[in-house]
């Protein structure tokens, strides 16, 4: 195992200390071997690897969807392993914005409503009506969809739907934007526009962690690490 250490200033957003995950058997299966990883605030890190390499396990641990079986994971300096499930869920809702390959939008809710619903799981839980609607509109404007606030997902292009999903991830002002193959369902031109948006958000100071199998997508990161056979094993210079 080779450690991978961040170089940005400030306290880490993500810090893996010999983090690994083994699923119980028989026989036991080690999906992620113990590894070290530090991501500083404002970094743009991409994780590359083929199918079955351990990227999904890495994503699930980083996103607080699965708990590691070994090691220590600190998110914004908080030891996530010491938290009960309810606190881990709350921490995930406040600190992490997710963007997936599939958009996961409710088809009969407007763009604004889809984004506003995300605030039920963030610090805005107690807000109602305009209390959620205005931040949702602001998030949509931030991703270039201020003119599509009332559009249904069925009336949006694939790129616009992914922008709604990104706005939904941003509305709670997370510490980390965690992207899982965010361009996998998009054509080349649309994918480039979404990647340009992620570049812009990073330039504004957002910490981005993007998982992909595509080297061209990975090249948008300022730092790229590789995972293969469950081993996070080297740092690769981003193009």
Image (cartoon, rainbow, N blue to C red):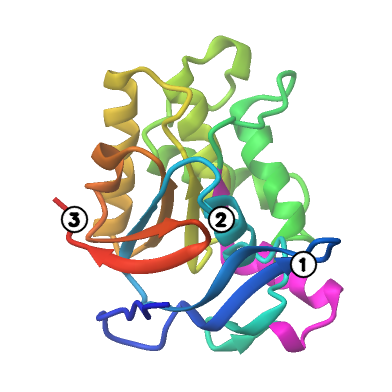
The location of residue 5, given as percent across then percent down, is 33, 81
Q: Residues within 10 Å of mark 2 (few under 14, many from 20)?
A: many
Residue at the (53%, 64%) spot, across then down: 174
* Mark 3 residue element: loop
Marks 2 and 3, the one that precedes in the sequence: 2
The location of residue 136, given as percent across then percent down, is 58, 44
Tell me which segment is drawn in magenta: 81-99
Q: Return the residue nearer the eye: 218 or 196.
A: 218
* Mark 2 residue element: strand
Which of discs 3 and 1 lies nearer the camera? The answer is 3
User: For this view, does 7 lie left or right of residue 146?
Assistant: left
Position of 30 relative to 13 (above/below)? above
User: For this view, does 237 lie left or right of residue 25?
Assistant: left
User: What secondary structure characterizes most of the magenta part?
Assistant: helix
Place residue 31 in its image quadrant: bottom right
Residue at the (31%, 79%) spot, across then down: 6
Q: Which residue is mark 3?
A: 238
Position of 5 relative to 224 (above/below)? below
The location of residue 226, given as percent across then percent down, is 36, 58
User: For this view, does 197 lie left or right of residue 154?
Assistant: left
Instruction: Tell me, yes or no, whether the highlighted magenta stretch contains residue 121.
Output: no
Position of 203 relative to 142 (above/below)? below
Marks 2 and 1, the one that precedes in the sequence: 1
Residue at the (69%, 48%) spot, across then down: 118
- Count numbered badges in the picture: 3
Determine the CA span between mark 2 and mark 3: 24 Å
Q: Return the residue nearer the eye: 47 or 105.
A: 47
Q: Which residue is mark 1?
A: 89
- Which circle marks residue 97 in the picture? 2
Determine the CA span between mark 3 and mark 1: 33 Å
Determine the CA span between mark 2 and mark 1: 13 Å
The quarter in which the N terminus is drawn is bottom left
């Amino acid at each position: 195992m080779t450690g991978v250490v961040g170089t940005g200033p400030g306290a880490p957003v993500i810090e893996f200390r010999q983090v690994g995950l083994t699923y119980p058997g028989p026989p036991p299966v080690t999906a992620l071997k113990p590894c070290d990883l530090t991501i500083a605030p404002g970094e743009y890190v991409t994780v590359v690897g083929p199918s079955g390499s351990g990227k999904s396990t890495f994503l699930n641990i980083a996103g607080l969807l699965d708990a590691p079986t070994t090691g220590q994971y600190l998110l914004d300096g908080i030891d996530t392993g010491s938290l009960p499930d309810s606190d881990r869920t709350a921490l995930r809702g406040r600190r992490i914005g997710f963007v997936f390959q599939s958009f996961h939008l409710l088809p009969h809710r407007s763009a604004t409503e889809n984004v506003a619903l995300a605030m039920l799981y963030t610090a805005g839980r107690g807000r109602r009506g305009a209390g959620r609607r205005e931040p949702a509109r602001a998030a949509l404007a931030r991703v270039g969809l201020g003119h599509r606030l009332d559009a249904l997902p069925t009336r949006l292009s694939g790129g616009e739907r992914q922008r709604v999903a990104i706005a939904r991830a941003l509305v709670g002002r997370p510490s980390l934007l965690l992207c899982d193959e965010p361009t996998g369902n998009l054509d080349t031109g649309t994918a480039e526009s979404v990647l340009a948006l992620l570049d812009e958000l990073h330039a504004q100071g957002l910490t981005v962690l993007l998982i992909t199998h595509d080297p061209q997508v990975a090249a948008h990161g300022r730092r790229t690490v590789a995972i293969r056979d469950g081993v996070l094993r080297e740092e690769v210079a981003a193009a």
